[in-house]
Amino acid sequence: MSWRADERWRTERWRTELVAIGAFALRNLQMASRNVFLLFEVLFWPVVGVIGIGLMARFLELSAEATSFILIGQIAFSTVSVCQLDVAYAVLYDVWSKSVKHQFLAPIGVRHLTIGSWLIGILRSLIVFAMLAALGWWAFGFDALHAGPWPLAIFLLGCSLTAWAVSVLVCTLIMLLGARAETAAWASVNFVLTLAGIYYSVAVLPKPMAAMAAAIPLTYFLDAYRAYYGFPAEFAHPILYGLVLAVAYVALSHWALVAAVRSARRSGLLLKMSE
Amino acid sequence: MLAIDARDVAKTFRAGVFRRRETVALAGVSLGVPRGAIFGLLGPNGAGKTTLLSIFATLLLPDRGTVTVLGHDVVREAGALRRRLNMASGNASFVWALRPPEILDFYGRLYGLSGARLRQRVGALLEMCELTAHRRVPYNELSTGLKQRLALAKALVNDPELLFLDEPTLGLDPDVSVRLREHIARLRREQGMTIVLTTHYMREAEQLCDEIAFVKAGRVLARGTADELKRQIRIGDVIALRLDPPEAPWLADLEGVLRCVTAQGGIECTVDDAEKRLSEILRALHAEGIIVRDVQVREPELEEVFVELAR
Protein backbone atom coordinates (compact mmCIF):
# COMPACT_ATOMS: atom_id res chain seq x y z
CA MET A 1 0.00 0.00 0.00
CA SER A 2 1.45 3.40 -0.98
CA TRP A 3 1.90 6.10 1.66
CA ARG A 4 -0.98 8.10 0.19
CA ALA A 5 -3.33 5.12 0.08
CA ASP A 6 -2.28 4.17 3.58
CA GLU A 7 -3.04 7.69 4.78
CA ARG A 8 -6.43 7.65 3.02
CA TRP A 9 -7.28 4.29 4.60
CA ARG A 10 -6.31 5.59 8.04
CA THR A 11 -8.38 8.78 7.59
CA GLU A 12 -11.36 6.75 6.40
CA ARG A 13 -11.03 4.43 9.36
CA TRP A 14 -10.95 7.30 11.83
CA ARG A 15 -13.95 8.89 10.11
CA THR A 16 -15.89 5.61 10.35
CA GLU A 17 -14.99 5.27 14.03
CA LEU A 18 -16.16 8.80 14.82
CA VAL A 19 -19.35 8.42 12.79
CA ALA A 20 -20.32 5.22 14.67
CA ILE A 21 -19.55 6.86 18.03
CA GLY A 22 -21.61 9.86 16.91
CA ALA A 23 -24.54 7.56 16.07
CA PHE A 24 -24.87 6.42 19.67
CA ALA A 25 -24.29 9.91 21.03
CA LEU A 26 -27.00 11.32 18.77
CA ARG A 27 -29.48 8.56 19.64
CA ASN A 28 -28.98 9.06 23.38
CA LEU A 29 -29.44 12.79 22.91
CA GLN A 30 -32.66 12.27 20.91
CA MET A 31 -34.04 9.88 23.52
CA ALA A 32 -33.02 12.12 26.42
CA SER A 33 -34.85 15.06 24.86
CA ARG A 34 -38.08 13.07 24.32
CA ASN A 35 -38.41 11.05 27.49
CA VAL A 36 -39.97 12.74 30.49
CA PHE A 37 -38.36 10.24 32.87
CA LEU A 38 -34.94 11.17 31.58
CA LEU A 39 -35.70 14.83 32.19
CA PHE A 40 -36.71 13.85 35.73
CA GLU A 41 -33.35 12.13 36.14
CA VAL A 42 -31.57 15.38 35.37
CA LEU A 43 -33.88 17.92 36.94
CA PHE A 44 -35.94 16.36 39.68
CA TRP A 45 -34.09 13.66 41.64
CA PRO A 46 -30.73 15.48 41.90
CA VAL A 47 -32.44 18.66 43.13
CA VAL A 48 -34.58 16.73 45.64
CA GLY A 49 -31.45 14.92 46.86
CA VAL A 50 -29.42 18.08 47.48
CA ILE A 51 -32.34 19.89 49.13
CA GLY A 52 -33.05 16.88 51.39
CA ILE A 53 -29.43 16.43 52.43
CA GLY A 54 -28.89 20.17 52.88
CA LEU A 55 -31.97 20.55 55.08
CA MET A 56 -30.97 17.53 57.14
CA ALA A 57 -27.55 19.15 57.72
CA ARG A 58 -29.28 22.36 58.81
CA PHE A 59 -31.60 20.46 61.18
CA LEU A 60 -28.64 18.62 62.71
CA GLU A 61 -26.81 21.97 62.99
CA LEU A 62 -23.77 20.64 61.16
CA SER A 63 -20.82 22.94 60.64
CA ALA A 64 -20.24 24.50 57.20
CA GLU A 65 -17.37 22.02 56.63
CA ALA A 66 -19.48 18.98 57.56
CA THR A 67 -22.31 20.26 55.33
CA SER A 68 -19.83 20.61 52.46
CA PHE A 69 -18.60 17.06 53.11
CA ILE A 70 -22.00 15.46 52.70
CA LEU A 71 -23.12 17.77 49.88
CA ILE A 72 -20.01 16.79 47.89
CA GLY A 73 -21.09 13.17 48.36
CA GLN A 74 -24.64 13.94 47.25
CA ILE A 75 -23.53 15.89 44.19
CA ALA A 76 -21.07 13.09 43.28
CA PHE A 77 -23.92 10.60 43.61
CA SER A 78 -26.15 12.48 41.16
CA THR A 79 -23.30 13.17 38.75
CA VAL A 80 -22.11 9.56 38.60
CA SER A 81 -25.65 8.23 38.53
CA VAL A 82 -26.78 10.32 35.54
CA CYS A 83 -23.57 9.64 33.61
CA GLN A 84 -23.62 5.89 34.13
CA LEU A 85 -27.31 5.59 33.23
CA ASP A 86 -26.64 7.02 29.77
CA VAL A 87 -24.22 4.21 28.94
CA ALA A 88 -26.58 1.58 30.38
CA TYR A 89 -29.41 3.10 28.31
CA ALA A 90 -27.44 2.58 25.10
CA VAL A 91 -27.98 -1.17 25.64
CA LEU A 92 -31.29 -0.94 27.47
CA TYR A 93 -33.03 1.04 24.69
CA ASP A 94 -32.37 -1.91 22.38
CA VAL A 95 -33.29 -4.49 25.03
CA TRP A 96 -36.57 -2.74 25.78
CA SER A 97 -37.40 -2.29 22.11
CA LYS A 98 -36.17 -5.82 21.26
CA SER A 99 -33.79 -4.51 18.61
CA VAL A 100 -30.49 -5.71 20.07
CA LYS A 101 -29.63 -7.86 17.08
CA HIS A 102 -29.76 -4.98 14.59
CA GLN A 103 -27.09 -3.14 16.51
CA PHE A 104 -24.74 -6.12 16.66
CA LEU A 105 -25.42 -7.05 13.05
CA ALA A 106 -23.71 -3.79 12.08
CA PRO A 107 -19.91 -3.60 11.76
CA ILE A 108 -19.38 -1.88 15.11
CA GLY A 109 -17.52 -2.67 18.30
CA VAL A 110 -18.72 -2.14 21.85
CA ARG A 111 -16.36 0.85 22.05
CA HIS A 112 -18.62 2.82 19.73
CA LEU A 113 -21.62 2.13 21.92
CA THR A 114 -19.89 2.93 25.20
CA ILE A 115 -17.91 6.00 24.11
CA GLY A 116 -20.84 7.56 22.21
CA SER A 117 -23.29 7.18 25.06
CA TRP A 118 -20.66 8.11 27.67
CA LEU A 119 -20.09 11.46 25.94
CA ILE A 120 -23.79 12.29 26.32
CA GLY A 121 -23.60 10.98 29.89
CA ILE A 122 -20.80 13.43 30.62
CA LEU A 123 -22.82 16.25 29.05
CA ARG A 124 -25.90 15.43 31.14
CA SER A 125 -23.86 14.97 34.31
CA LEU A 126 -22.14 18.34 33.79
CA ILE A 127 -25.57 19.95 33.55
CA VAL A 128 -26.53 18.18 36.79
CA PHE A 129 -23.32 19.28 38.50
CA ALA A 130 -23.71 22.92 37.42
CA MET A 131 -27.33 22.96 38.54
CA LEU A 132 -26.57 21.37 41.93
CA ALA A 133 -23.53 23.59 42.51
CA ALA A 134 -25.73 26.64 41.94
CA LEU A 135 -28.45 25.24 44.20
CA GLY A 136 -25.94 24.30 46.95
CA TRP A 137 -24.47 27.79 46.87
CA TRP A 138 -27.84 29.56 46.86
CA ALA A 139 -29.60 27.41 49.48
CA PHE A 140 -26.79 26.23 51.78
CA GLY A 141 -23.83 28.48 51.08
CA PHE A 142 -21.81 25.57 49.70
CA ASP A 143 -19.12 26.66 47.25
CA ALA A 144 -18.54 23.79 44.82
CA LEU A 145 -15.83 25.81 43.04
CA HIS A 146 -13.86 26.45 46.22
CA ALA A 147 -11.11 23.98 45.23
CA GLY A 148 -10.40 25.78 41.96
CA PRO A 149 -10.82 24.69 38.31
CA TRP A 150 -8.18 21.91 38.11
CA PRO A 151 -9.14 19.95 41.25
CA LEU A 152 -12.76 20.31 40.15
CA ALA A 153 -11.95 19.06 36.64
CA ILE A 154 -10.08 16.06 38.09
CA PHE A 155 -12.97 15.34 40.47
CA LEU A 156 -15.46 15.40 37.60
CA LEU A 157 -13.14 13.25 35.48
CA GLY A 158 -13.02 10.76 38.36
CA CYS A 159 -16.83 10.75 38.57
CA SER A 160 -17.10 10.19 34.80
CA LEU A 161 -14.54 7.37 34.71
CA THR A 162 -16.23 5.65 37.67
CA ALA A 163 -19.57 6.03 35.87
CA TRP A 164 -18.03 4.47 32.73
CA ALA A 165 -16.67 1.44 34.60
CA VAL A 166 -19.91 0.86 36.57
CA SER A 167 -22.14 1.25 33.52
CA VAL A 168 -20.07 -0.96 31.25
CA LEU A 169 -20.22 -3.65 33.92
CA VAL A 170 -24.00 -3.17 34.02
CA CYS A 171 -24.08 -3.63 30.21
CA THR A 172 -21.97 -6.77 30.69
CA LEU A 173 -24.51 -8.16 33.16
CA ILE A 174 -27.35 -7.42 30.73
CA MET A 175 -25.48 -9.22 27.95
CA LEU A 176 -24.91 -12.21 30.22
CA LEU A 177 -28.29 -12.41 31.97
CA GLY A 178 -30.68 -10.54 29.69
CA ALA A 179 -33.31 -8.00 30.66
CA ARG A 180 -33.60 -9.37 34.21
CA ALA A 181 -30.26 -7.65 34.95
CA GLU A 182 -31.66 -4.21 34.13
CA THR A 183 -32.22 -3.33 37.79
CA ALA A 184 -28.42 -3.36 38.09
CA ALA A 185 -28.47 -0.10 36.12
CA TRP A 186 -30.01 1.66 39.12
CA ALA A 187 -28.75 -0.53 41.97
CA SER A 188 -25.06 -0.66 41.09
CA VAL A 189 -24.32 3.03 41.49
CA ASN A 190 -25.96 3.07 44.94
CA PHE A 191 -23.83 0.14 46.00
CA VAL A 192 -20.61 1.69 44.70
CA LEU A 193 -21.30 5.06 46.32
CA THR A 194 -22.22 3.47 49.63
CA LEU A 195 -18.79 1.85 49.65
CA ALA A 196 -16.98 4.92 48.32
CA GLY A 197 -18.02 7.03 51.34
CA ILE A 198 -20.84 9.12 49.97
CA TYR A 199 -21.83 10.84 53.28
CA TYR A 200 -18.99 9.66 55.54
CA SER A 201 -15.31 8.91 55.65
CA VAL A 202 -14.39 5.38 54.57
CA ALA A 203 -12.58 5.11 57.92
CA VAL A 204 -15.97 4.37 59.54
CA LEU A 205 -16.58 1.32 57.34
CA PRO A 206 -16.05 -2.19 58.74
CA LYS A 207 -12.75 -3.67 57.62
CA PRO A 208 -13.97 -5.88 54.74
CA MET A 209 -16.04 -3.01 53.37
CA ALA A 210 -13.13 -0.60 53.79
CA ALA A 211 -11.00 -2.98 51.73
CA MET A 212 -13.68 -2.93 49.01
CA ALA A 213 -13.84 0.88 49.24
CA ALA A 214 -10.09 1.02 48.65
CA ALA A 215 -10.67 -0.77 45.34
CA ILE A 216 -13.12 1.88 44.07
CA PRO A 217 -11.61 4.84 42.19
CA LEU A 218 -14.33 7.26 43.32
CA THR A 219 -13.23 6.75 46.96
CA TYR A 220 -9.92 8.45 46.08
CA PHE A 221 -11.45 11.24 44.01
CA LEU A 222 -13.90 12.08 46.81
CA ASP A 223 -11.03 11.97 49.31
CA ALA A 224 -8.88 14.28 47.20
CA TYR A 225 -11.67 16.77 46.57
CA ARG A 226 -12.82 16.89 50.17
CA ALA A 227 -9.25 17.67 51.24
CA TYR A 228 -9.75 21.12 49.67
CA TYR A 229 -12.57 21.68 52.17
CA GLY A 230 -10.36 21.09 55.18
CA PHE A 231 -10.72 17.35 55.68
CA PRO A 232 -7.45 15.47 56.02
CA ALA A 233 -6.95 12.97 53.16
CA GLU A 234 -7.37 9.31 54.13
CA PHE A 235 -5.04 8.12 51.40
CA ALA A 236 -1.61 9.15 50.16
CA HIS A 237 -1.60 10.33 46.49
CA PRO A 238 -5.36 9.81 46.10
CA ILE A 239 -5.54 11.29 42.58
CA LEU A 240 -2.78 9.01 41.30
CA TYR A 241 -4.39 5.92 42.85
CA GLY A 242 -7.82 6.98 41.67
CA LEU A 243 -6.67 7.51 38.07
CA VAL A 244 -4.71 4.24 37.93
CA LEU A 245 -7.66 2.30 39.32
CA ALA A 246 -10.14 4.07 37.03
CA VAL A 247 -8.09 3.34 33.91
CA ALA A 248 -7.68 -0.30 34.99
CA TYR A 249 -11.46 -0.65 35.56
CA VAL A 250 -12.27 1.01 32.24
CA ALA A 251 -10.02 -1.49 30.43
CA LEU A 252 -11.33 -4.42 32.49
CA SER A 253 -15.00 -3.53 32.00
CA HIS A 254 -14.47 -3.02 28.25
CA TRP A 255 -12.86 -6.44 27.98
CA ALA A 256 -15.71 -7.96 30.06
CA LEU A 257 -18.35 -6.43 27.76
CA VAL A 258 -16.58 -7.67 24.62
CA ALA A 259 -16.48 -11.17 26.16
CA ALA A 260 -20.16 -10.92 27.21
CA VAL A 261 -21.27 -9.96 23.68
CA ARG A 262 -19.33 -12.93 22.32
CA SER A 263 -20.95 -15.16 24.94
CA ALA A 264 -24.40 -13.81 23.94
CA ARG A 265 -23.62 -14.66 20.31
CA ARG A 266 -22.71 -18.18 21.42
CA SER A 267 -25.65 -18.78 23.78
CA GLY A 268 -28.26 -17.18 21.52
CA LEU A 269 -29.15 -14.54 24.11
CA LEU A 270 -28.50 -11.85 21.52
CA LEU A 271 -31.36 -13.27 19.46
CA LYS A 272 -33.54 -13.96 22.47
CA MET A 273 -33.31 -10.32 23.51
CA SER A 274 -34.63 -9.40 20.05
CA GLU A 275 -37.76 -11.59 20.19
CA MET B 1 -19.83 -19.01 -7.41
CA LEU B 2 -21.33 -19.43 -3.96
CA ALA B 3 -22.46 -16.58 -1.74
CA ILE B 4 -22.84 -18.99 1.18
CA ASP B 5 -21.00 -22.24 1.68
CA ALA B 6 -22.01 -24.02 4.91
CA ARG B 7 -20.61 -27.38 5.85
CA ASP B 8 -21.79 -29.62 8.65
CA VAL B 9 -23.13 -26.74 10.76
CA ALA B 10 -24.42 -27.75 14.18
CA LYS B 11 -25.93 -25.69 16.98
CA THR B 12 -27.39 -26.73 20.32
CA PHE B 13 -29.01 -24.26 22.69
CA ARG B 14 -28.51 -24.86 26.38
CA ALA B 15 -30.76 -23.37 29.07
CA GLY B 16 -31.23 -23.66 32.82
CA VAL B 17 -28.61 -23.46 35.55
CA PHE B 18 -29.46 -26.41 37.79
CA ARG B 19 -31.53 -28.49 35.38
CA ARG B 20 -29.75 -28.15 32.06
CA ARG B 21 -32.00 -28.38 29.04
CA GLU B 22 -30.56 -28.90 25.59
CA THR B 23 -32.29 -28.18 22.30
CA VAL B 24 -30.62 -29.29 19.10
CA ALA B 25 -31.40 -26.55 16.61
CA LEU B 26 -29.09 -27.66 13.79
CA ALA B 27 -27.73 -31.16 13.44
CA GLY B 28 -25.15 -30.91 10.68
CA VAL B 29 -26.45 -28.69 7.90
CA SER B 30 -24.53 -28.40 4.64
CA LEU B 31 -25.82 -25.88 2.15
CA GLY B 32 -24.58 -23.78 -0.76
CA VAL B 33 -26.33 -20.63 -1.93
CA PRO B 34 -25.34 -19.32 -5.37
CA ARG B 35 -24.53 -15.63 -5.79
CA GLY B 36 -27.38 -13.54 -7.16
CA ALA B 37 -30.03 -16.09 -6.26
CA ILE B 38 -33.15 -15.80 -4.14
CA PHE B 39 -32.91 -18.79 -1.88
CA GLY B 40 -35.74 -19.94 0.35
CA LEU B 41 -35.54 -21.79 3.64
CA LEU B 42 -38.79 -23.55 4.38
CA GLY B 43 -39.79 -25.69 7.28
CA PRO B 44 -42.16 -26.01 10.23
CA ASN B 45 -41.79 -23.94 13.41
CA GLY B 46 -38.65 -24.84 15.34
CA ALA B 47 -37.05 -26.46 12.29
CA GLY B 48 -33.87 -24.38 12.64
CA LYS B 49 -34.43 -21.88 9.80
CA THR B 50 -33.88 -18.74 11.87
CA THR B 51 -30.92 -20.33 13.65
CA LEU B 52 -29.29 -21.06 10.30
CA LEU B 53 -30.02 -17.55 9.04
CA SER B 54 -28.59 -16.05 12.25
CA ILE B 55 -25.37 -18.04 11.89
CA PHE B 56 -25.01 -16.86 8.29
CA ALA B 57 -25.59 -13.28 9.49
CA THR B 58 -22.91 -13.59 12.25
CA LEU B 59 -25.48 -13.10 15.02
CA LEU B 60 -24.94 -16.60 16.35
CA LEU B 61 -21.80 -18.70 16.62
CA PRO B 62 -22.01 -22.30 15.41
CA ASP B 63 -20.90 -25.12 17.72
CA ARG B 64 -19.45 -27.11 14.84
CA GLY B 65 -18.86 -26.82 11.11
CA THR B 66 -17.61 -24.08 8.82
CA VAL B 67 -19.56 -21.29 7.17
CA THR B 68 -18.10 -19.05 4.50
CA VAL B 69 -20.24 -16.09 3.48
CA LEU B 70 -19.12 -13.88 0.58
CA GLY B 71 -15.68 -15.42 0.97
CA HIS B 72 -15.42 -14.58 4.70
CA ASP B 73 -15.42 -17.06 7.56
CA VAL B 74 -18.42 -16.11 9.75
CA VAL B 75 -16.48 -16.63 12.98
CA ARG B 76 -13.01 -15.29 12.22
CA GLU B 77 -13.88 -12.53 9.74
CA ALA B 78 -17.26 -11.43 11.05
CA GLY B 79 -16.29 -7.73 11.17
CA ALA B 80 -15.43 -7.51 7.48
CA LEU B 81 -18.47 -9.56 6.55
CA ARG B 82 -20.95 -7.42 8.47
CA ARG B 83 -20.28 -4.45 6.18
CA ARG B 84 -21.51 -6.48 3.21
CA LEU B 85 -24.72 -8.01 4.54
CA ASN B 86 -27.89 -7.00 6.31
CA MET B 87 -31.05 -8.54 7.64
CA ALA B 88 -34.75 -7.77 8.10
CA SER B 89 -37.15 -9.77 10.21
CA GLY B 90 -40.90 -9.98 9.99
CA ASN B 91 -41.12 -9.22 13.69
CA ALA B 92 -38.46 -6.51 13.58
CA SER B 93 -38.58 -3.80 16.19
CA PHE B 94 -36.76 -0.52 16.70
CA VAL B 95 -36.43 2.06 19.46
CA TRP B 96 -39.97 3.27 20.10
CA ALA B 97 -39.55 7.03 20.26
CA LEU B 98 -37.47 7.50 17.12
CA ARG B 99 -38.99 8.42 13.76
CA PRO B 100 -38.31 6.50 10.53
CA PRO B 101 -35.63 8.91 9.21
CA GLU B 102 -33.89 8.90 12.62
CA ILE B 103 -33.86 5.10 12.73
CA LEU B 104 -32.39 4.89 9.23
CA ASP B 105 -29.94 7.67 10.09
CA PHE B 106 -28.77 5.78 13.21
CA TYR B 107 -28.17 2.50 11.38
CA GLY B 108 -26.66 4.32 8.40
CA ARG B 109 -24.06 5.83 10.71
CA LEU B 110 -23.28 2.40 12.16
CA TYR B 111 -22.38 1.38 8.60
CA GLY B 112 -20.09 4.42 8.22
CA LEU B 113 -22.40 6.70 6.23
CA SER B 114 -22.40 10.38 7.09
CA GLY B 115 -23.12 13.87 5.73
CA ALA B 116 -24.77 14.30 2.35
CA ARG B 117 -24.33 10.63 1.43
CA LEU B 118 -26.28 9.56 4.51
CA ARG B 119 -29.01 12.14 3.93
CA GLN B 120 -29.40 11.03 0.30
CA ARG B 121 -29.50 7.35 1.26
CA VAL B 122 -32.09 7.90 3.99
CA GLY B 123 -34.24 10.03 1.65
CA ALA B 124 -34.00 7.44 -1.14
CA LEU B 125 -34.93 4.56 1.18
CA LEU B 126 -37.90 6.44 2.63
CA GLU B 127 -39.06 7.13 -0.91
CA MET B 128 -38.45 3.57 -2.10
CA CYS B 129 -40.30 1.98 0.84
CA GLU B 130 -43.12 4.57 0.66
CA LEU B 131 -42.40 5.95 4.11
CA THR B 132 -41.90 9.60 3.23
CA ALA B 133 -45.44 10.52 4.29
CA HIS B 134 -44.82 8.93 7.70
CA ARG B 135 -41.44 10.52 8.40
CA ARG B 136 -42.69 12.41 11.47
CA VAL B 137 -44.46 9.47 13.13
CA PRO B 138 -42.64 7.80 16.08
CA TYR B 139 -41.91 4.11 15.51
CA ASN B 140 -44.39 2.85 18.11
CA GLU B 141 -47.23 4.65 16.31
CA LEU B 142 -46.55 3.06 12.90
CA SER B 143 -48.83 0.28 11.57
CA THR B 144 -47.47 -3.27 11.20
CA GLY B 145 -47.10 -2.84 7.45
CA LEU B 146 -45.15 0.40 7.84
CA LYS B 147 -42.92 -1.20 10.47
CA GLN B 148 -42.15 -4.07 8.06
CA ARG B 149 -41.33 -1.60 5.30
CA LEU B 150 -39.08 0.31 7.66
CA ALA B 151 -37.34 -2.95 8.59
CA LEU B 152 -36.69 -3.58 4.90
CA ALA B 153 -35.44 -0.01 4.44
CA LYS B 154 -33.07 -0.46 7.39
CA ALA B 155 -31.80 -3.71 5.88
CA LEU B 156 -30.94 -1.85 2.67
CA VAL B 157 -29.19 1.09 4.33
CA ASN B 158 -25.69 -0.25 3.58
CA ASP B 159 -26.61 -1.44 0.08
CA PRO B 160 -25.79 -5.04 1.03
CA GLU B 161 -24.56 -7.71 -1.36
CA LEU B 162 -26.36 -10.32 0.69
CA LEU B 163 -29.74 -9.77 2.30
CA PHE B 164 -31.38 -12.05 4.86
CA LEU B 165 -35.14 -11.84 5.22
CA ASP B 166 -36.68 -13.72 8.10
CA GLU B 167 -40.43 -14.10 7.46
CA PRO B 168 -40.58 -10.74 5.63
CA THR B 169 -44.36 -10.74 5.03
CA LEU B 170 -45.42 -12.14 8.40
CA GLY B 171 -48.72 -10.63 9.52
CA LEU B 172 -49.07 -8.29 6.56
CA ASP B 173 -52.22 -7.53 4.60
CA PRO B 174 -52.27 -9.36 1.23
CA ASP B 175 -51.85 -6.18 -0.84
CA VAL B 176 -48.86 -5.07 1.25
CA SER B 177 -47.34 -8.57 0.97
CA VAL B 178 -47.67 -8.49 -2.81
CA ARG B 179 -45.94 -5.10 -2.99
CA LEU B 180 -43.17 -6.24 -0.66
CA ARG B 181 -42.61 -9.38 -2.76
CA GLU B 182 -42.40 -7.29 -5.91
CA HIS B 183 -39.88 -5.15 -4.14
CA ILE B 184 -37.75 -8.14 -3.13
CA ALA B 185 -37.81 -9.49 -6.70
CA ARG B 186 -36.79 -6.06 -8.01
CA LEU B 187 -33.81 -5.91 -5.64
CA ARG B 188 -32.40 -9.08 -7.14
CA ARG B 189 -33.30 -8.13 -10.71
CA GLU B 190 -31.91 -4.60 -10.63
CA GLN B 191 -29.05 -4.91 -8.13
CA GLY B 192 -28.05 -8.54 -8.43
CA MET B 193 -28.45 -8.90 -4.67
CA THR B 194 -28.30 -12.40 -3.18
CA ILE B 195 -31.35 -12.90 -0.96
CA VAL B 196 -31.93 -15.68 1.53
CA LEU B 197 -35.40 -15.77 3.02
CA THR B 198 -37.36 -17.89 5.41
CA THR B 199 -41.10 -18.07 5.00
CA HIS B 200 -44.17 -20.03 5.96
CA TYR B 201 -46.00 -18.99 2.81
CA MET B 202 -45.53 -21.56 0.06
CA ARG B 203 -46.85 -19.24 -2.63
CA GLU B 204 -44.26 -16.67 -1.60
CA ALA B 205 -41.47 -19.25 -1.84
CA GLU B 206 -42.74 -20.51 -5.18
CA GLN B 207 -43.05 -16.99 -6.62
CA LEU B 208 -39.78 -15.59 -5.37
CA CYS B 209 -37.22 -18.33 -4.89
CA ASP B 210 -34.90 -19.78 -7.49
CA GLU B 211 -34.14 -22.58 -5.11
CA ILE B 212 -35.65 -23.86 -1.89
CA ALA B 213 -34.30 -25.96 0.96
CA PHE B 214 -36.67 -27.79 3.30
CA VAL B 215 -35.39 -27.78 6.85
CA LYS B 216 -36.79 -30.00 9.56
CA ALA B 217 -35.42 -30.91 12.98
CA GLY B 218 -32.14 -29.15 12.22
CA ARG B 219 -31.49 -30.95 8.93
CA VAL B 220 -31.97 -30.12 5.27
CA LEU B 221 -34.38 -32.77 4.02
CA ALA B 222 -34.59 -31.69 0.40
CA ARG B 223 -33.48 -28.87 -1.86
CA GLY B 224 -34.05 -27.75 -5.41
CA THR B 225 -36.34 -25.55 -7.47
CA ALA B 226 -40.04 -25.71 -6.63
CA ASP B 227 -40.62 -28.00 -9.65
CA GLU B 228 -37.68 -30.23 -8.77
CA LEU B 229 -38.97 -30.61 -5.23
CA LYS B 230 -42.40 -31.59 -6.48
CA ARG B 231 -40.81 -34.25 -8.65
CA GLN B 232 -38.34 -35.36 -5.95
CA ILE B 233 -41.01 -35.81 -3.33
CA ARG B 234 -43.27 -38.22 -5.16
CA ILE B 235 -46.54 -37.61 -3.46
CA GLY B 236 -48.49 -38.34 -6.62
CA ASP B 237 -50.41 -36.29 -9.18
CA VAL B 238 -53.65 -34.48 -8.62
CA ILE B 239 -56.76 -35.09 -10.77
CA ALA B 240 -59.30 -32.33 -10.24
CA LEU B 241 -62.88 -33.24 -11.26
CA ARG B 242 -66.15 -31.32 -11.52
CA LEU B 243 -69.01 -33.81 -11.48
CA ASP B 244 -72.77 -33.87 -11.87
CA PRO B 245 -74.00 -34.92 -9.30
CA PRO B 246 -71.01 -33.44 -7.43
CA GLU B 247 -70.43 -36.24 -4.88
CA ALA B 248 -68.61 -39.55 -5.54
CA PRO B 249 -67.09 -40.65 -2.21
CA TRP B 250 -66.32 -44.16 -3.51
CA LEU B 251 -63.55 -42.73 -5.76
CA ALA B 252 -61.17 -42.93 -2.76
CA ASP B 253 -61.58 -46.73 -2.76
CA LEU B 254 -60.35 -47.20 -6.33
CA GLU B 255 -56.94 -48.74 -6.87
CA GLY B 256 -54.10 -46.21 -7.11
CA VAL B 257 -56.15 -43.39 -5.55
CA LEU B 258 -54.25 -42.18 -2.50
CA ARG B 259 -56.85 -39.74 -1.20
CA CYS B 260 -59.79 -37.61 -2.32
CA VAL B 261 -60.80 -34.23 -0.98
CA THR B 262 -63.62 -31.85 -1.82
CA ALA B 263 -62.14 -28.57 -3.01
CA GLN B 264 -63.61 -25.47 -4.66
CA GLY B 265 -66.89 -27.11 -5.67
CA GLY B 266 -65.17 -30.19 -7.09
CA ILE B 267 -63.21 -33.24 -6.05
CA GLU B 268 -59.40 -33.49 -6.01
CA CYS B 269 -57.99 -37.02 -6.13
CA THR B 270 -54.32 -37.60 -5.46
CA VAL B 271 -53.24 -40.64 -7.48
CA ASP B 272 -49.98 -42.56 -7.79
CA ASP B 273 -49.82 -42.08 -11.58
CA ALA B 274 -52.23 -39.76 -13.40
CA GLU B 275 -51.56 -41.23 -16.86
CA LYS B 276 -52.56 -44.69 -15.69
CA ARG B 277 -55.44 -43.78 -13.34
CA LEU B 278 -57.25 -41.05 -15.29
CA SER B 279 -58.86 -43.45 -17.77
CA GLU B 280 -59.82 -45.86 -14.96
CA ILE B 281 -61.51 -43.09 -12.97
CA LEU B 282 -63.37 -41.76 -16.02
CA ARG B 283 -64.53 -45.29 -16.88
CA ALA B 284 -65.78 -45.86 -13.33
CA LEU B 285 -67.64 -42.53 -13.30
CA HIS B 286 -69.24 -43.30 -16.67
CA ALA B 287 -70.36 -46.73 -15.37
CA GLU B 288 -72.05 -45.03 -12.41
CA GLY B 289 -73.82 -42.56 -14.73
CA ILE B 290 -71.99 -39.53 -13.35
CA ILE B 291 -71.36 -36.73 -15.86
CA VAL B 292 -67.86 -35.28 -15.86
CA ARG B 293 -68.18 -31.52 -16.43
CA ASP B 294 -64.49 -30.73 -16.17
CA VAL B 295 -61.25 -32.59 -15.58
CA GLN B 296 -57.72 -31.26 -14.95
CA VAL B 297 -54.48 -33.01 -14.15
CA ARG B 298 -51.87 -31.04 -12.25
CA GLU B 299 -48.72 -31.49 -10.21
CA PRO B 300 -49.09 -31.15 -6.44
CA GLU B 301 -48.74 -27.65 -4.92
CA LEU B 302 -45.56 -26.82 -3.05
CA GLU B 303 -47.69 -26.66 0.06
CA GLU B 304 -48.60 -30.33 -0.36
CA VAL B 305 -44.90 -31.19 -0.72
CA PHE B 306 -44.24 -29.19 2.44
CA VAL B 307 -46.97 -31.02 4.36
CA GLU B 308 -45.56 -34.35 3.19
CA LEU B 309 -42.03 -33.42 4.28
CA ALA B 310 -43.08 -31.90 7.57
CA ARG B 311 -45.06 -35.04 8.47
Image (spheres, rainbow, N blue to C red):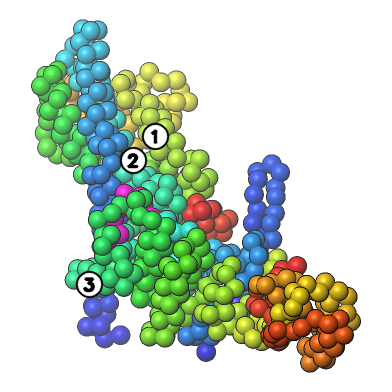
> Amino acid type of disc 3?
Gln
Whether residue A229 can be seen here: yes
> What residue is at 51 percent from the left and 53 percent from the top?
A275
Please give left or right for residue B19 compared with residue A145 in the image. Answer: right
> What residue is at 45 percent from the left and 73 percent from the top?
B178
- Was residue B159 drawn as part of the magenta stretch in this picture? no
- Local crowd size for mark 2, using a 10 Å CA cut-off: few (<14), some (14–19), many (≥20): many
Please give left or right for residue B179 compared with residue B2 in the image. Answer: left
Q: Observer-nearest residue: B240 or B94?
A: B240
The magenta region covers B94-101
Helix, strand or loop under label 1? helix
Give the letter of the chain under mark 2: A
Give the letter of the chain under mark 3: B
Give the letter of the chain under mark 1: A
| Residue A159, quarter of picture | top left
- Was residue B100 drawn as part of the magenta stretch in this picture? yes
Give the mark, 2 or 1, whose residue is nearer the N terminus: 2
Residue at which label 2 appears: A85
Q: Position of residue A37 (x, y in %)?
A: 30, 36
Using the numbered discs, state the Cα–Cα distance from disc 3 to disc 1 in whole angstroms.
40 Å
Same-subunit check for callouts 3 and 1: no
Helix, strand or loop under label 2? helix
Please give left or right for residue B132 compared with residue A267 in the image. Answer: left
Q: Position of residue A249 (x, y in %)?
A: 38, 45
Residue at which label 3 appears: B120
